Amino acid sequence: MSTLRRGRHFYANPGPTNIPDSVLHAVAHTSIDFNDPEFFAVYQASVAGLKRVLRTQHEVFLYTASGHGAWEATLVNLCSPGDTILMLESGYFSESWASMARRFGLRVETVAADWRRGVDLADVTAALRADAGHHIRAICAVHNETSSGMALPLADLRRAIDAAGHPALLLADTISSLGSFDFRMDDWGVDAVVGGSQKGLMLPTGFSFTAASPKALAAHAKASLPRFFFDWTTMLQRPHRSFTGTVPTTLFYGLAESIRLLEEEGLEAVFARHARLAEGVRRAVRVWAGNDGPEFFCLDPARRSNTVTAVLMPEGMNAEPVRRIALERFNVSIGGGLGRLGGKVFRIGHLGDLNEPMVLGTLAAVEMSLGLAGVPHGSGGVAAAMAWFAEAAASHG
Ligand SMILES: *Cc1c(COP(=O)(O)O)cnc(C)c1O
């Protein structure tokens, strides 16, 4: 049954995310020449803000493309045909990035991992030590694997790479972590950072970017994969030091506002809010897991993501009816399983412009939908989340 949608549509996918009203207003800007000084000032200020969120002093290249474009841009600007990259397996997104690399004629070595646990960092050190000839050009890591709800500790990864004394570039996909939990490009020695507009930055889909370290720029100078739209060398000669073709101007009025929102709250407070909301979701999942109900997909509690929780259905049960009921009956959109996880998991996104009652609304819709779909589960998940949010509110005065 399909029903008319009334009230606020609850969008609890892990991306795109809710767009704050003030950002919506900001992007509703009339066309302006992207070389107009008035726009250029907004552009420069918002890119400077983006660098503060990335915690970097380095160059940032922006593209009119979704995150996939930034993946591609990063590979073609840093690699030559036949180069080897080391992909750390995490889930659907590491698999897709690896497929893209193969299509460009790169050799992909994989540090294999169980998607429910993620890579063992000792295996990364071992793979790098085994590469005595230093053929591996780049190590690719997904900071937050959005398909499985798993975060990779990048500071620890940096140490694992340093332990091997390997000179490969470190590439990190931060599309679903940036602006939501801690990421420090320069401190952690990340050479190329991939990000997008529509997740933690709370913007419409439309631009993505790569931040590039001096070491990455030096590698770029020697990299020979064909590129045109994404060519950093061409971009560096343009006033915007980014973009081939028209700059999506409206998105930068939005970016200026989203940076203002993040900094008004304070990045540390933004991260604390995400941690608190994520814990509320986890309290609910723990309760639902009773009575042979659905359980955490990510088995390592230390790696459970603060932006998305993937919930594994009981053996033999499909997640799609739960998602359909949540959408059709309660106007709540949750994420489905990607790739080989299709039908096996549903995903609750908890990043961006979000507060406790919004999370509780989503959790209530999911709990009701589990019941309506005939999925066994422990009841009282929402109450457990409420108790946690109340406890957290009390302890923070
Ligand atoms: C969303 C996402 C992508 C893909 O980004 P698009 O904007 O959909 O192209 C890549 N990696 C991760 C980790 C993501 O969450």
Image (spheres, helix red, strand yellow):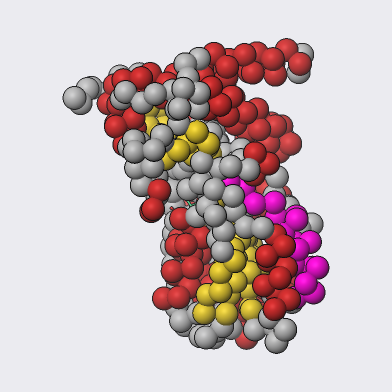
Residue sitting nearer the eye, 134 or 362: 134
Q: Quadrant of the N terminus?
A: top left
Q: Position of residue 273 (x, y in %)?
A: 65, 29
Write the residue at 44% across / 52% down: 206
Q: Is residue 162 magenta?
A: yes
Q: Is residue 169 visible?
A: no
Q: Is residue 317 visible?
A: yes
Q: Position of residue 361 (x, y in %)?
A: 46, 19
Q: Position of residue 295 (x, y in %)?
A: 50, 33
Residue at far left of view:
1
Q: How many marks?
A: 0
* Vertical relation: 367 (above or below) 314: above
* Vertical relation: 18 (above or below) 233: above
Residue sitting nearer the eye, 350 or 50: 350
Write the residue at 63% across / 73% down: 138
Residue sitting nearer the eye, 206 or 372: 372
Q: Is residue 151 magenta?
A: yes
Picture quarter containing residue 181? Answer: top right
* Vertical relation: 295 (above or below) 252: above
Q: Main secondary structure of the magenta part?
A: helix
**Magenta part of the protein: which range?**
150-166
Along the horizontal axis of the image, is 359 left or right of 168?
Answer: left
Residue sitting nearer the eye, 233 or 121: 121
Write the residue at 76% across / 18% down: 396
Q: Quadrant of the C terminus?
A: top right
Picture quarter containing residue 3? Answer: top left
Write the residue at 52% across / 86% down: 82
* Vertical relation: 289 (above or below) 137: above
